[in-house]
Image (spheres, rainbow, N blue to C red):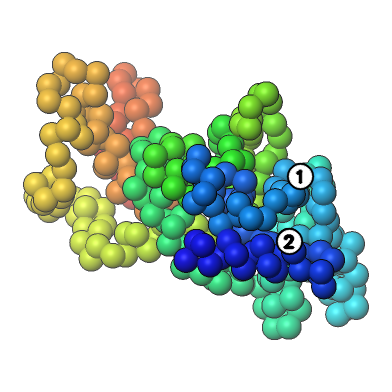
Amino acid sequence: MAAFIRIMFNNTFKTNPSMERAIMTGITRVSKDTAGVPWQSIFSDLNNLIVVMTTSDLYSTDFGFTENEVFAALDEMGYSSEDKQEIKLWYDGFIFGSYSDIYNPWSITHFLKTGKIDTYWANTSGNGLVGHLISNGAPNIKMDFEELITGGSVEAAIDEQIVFSQLDGNIDAIWSLLLASGYLKCEKIIQETPEDTAVYQLVLTNFEVKKMFERMVAGWFKKDASFNEFVKAMFLCDLRGMNQYMNKVALNTFSYFDAGKKPSEESEPEKFYHGFVLGLLVDNAKNYVLKSNRESGCGRYDGVLEPKNKKDVAVII
């Protein structure tokens, strides 16, 4: 297969006298696909490629609609200034090179056709690879991802030379992939290096991407029918039910490696269970403010749920 593609690329793109210019699209760049073995590369018979990444200035306004183009279309369709700001919130945010305010063309054209705001681009695929890398990633990946969903940012070393085979073995590969595929954008460069990597401050691209990730995370928990039995039992003051749920999960899921073998070790068992319980309580973030390990009164609580509606019950653990 590699030999066939290599010959096809050579005949089509390199030695074809009838072709003046061609554009090849993808996410990971082609110059490193060989993994150090040139004869295995499907690009070995196709050279002199100009590689354009998301951080390149070349063609920076050609990967989507500019704000002037979008607003001109909205004016022609009779949309108001308030409508424009909502469209900007949902579909703006892509940055190519030094040019910002690039809008997602797929989402914009679908909105202009239907008149309805929705996650058009985010629904074009199952996002299975991204979901797999996040759900199976290290704990700090999940914590950084939570920071992104809540409107924060993360600092990560981005390698634009990343290739598919490195995604599982490189802890920073997930951020390079999310940036290259448009789910994240670079707010600023924290540190430049002489190599192919640089430390970027990353945020979610726009509200459409945020909604997509929120639905993806919610879908992980819907797969478990017993999810939230702990919270339901807690609000009913059913300590027995809370214990049964914890025991069920601990016996079927946890390993002693998760909590540490001895209470005196750095990874104390209580910290692991504390984090697990906080994860169960986060589901109530719409109605409650969750705080952990704060000083209060004459001591310190493990966790507290402060109701946003003062008529609702508060919970202290």
Any part of residue 267 in sight: yes
66, above or below 292, in the image: below
Q: Are marks 1 and 2 in contact (CB under 8 Å)?
A: no
Q: Going 56% across and 65% down the picture, which residue do you hit?
A: 5
> Of discs 1 and 2, which sits in the foreground?
2
Q: Going 38% across and 26% down the picture, which residue do you hit?
A: 294
Residue 165, horizontal then vertical, whole percent: 44, 47
Which secondary structure lies at badge 2? helix
Q: Amino acid at mark 1?
A: Ser
For disc 2, the marked residue is 14
- Label 1 vs label 2: CA separation? 24 Å
The numbered mark, 1 or 2, whose residue comes first in the sequence reads: 2
Q: Quadrant of residue 262?
A: top left
Residue 19, horizontal then vertical, whole percent: 81, 69
Residue 276, horizontal then vertical, whole percent: 27, 41
Left or right: residue 246 versus residue 205 is: left
Any part of residue 145 in sight: no
Which residue is most to the top? 264
CA neighbours of label 1 inside 10 A, class few (<14), some (14 to 19), many (20+)? some
For disc 1, the marked residue is 56
Residue 215, horizontal then vertical, whole percent: 46, 63
Q: Nearer the viewer, residue 83 or 95?
A: 95
Q: Going 20% across and 35% down the picture, which residue do you hit?
A: 258
Q: Going 76% across and 44% down the picture, which residue do you hit?
A: 56
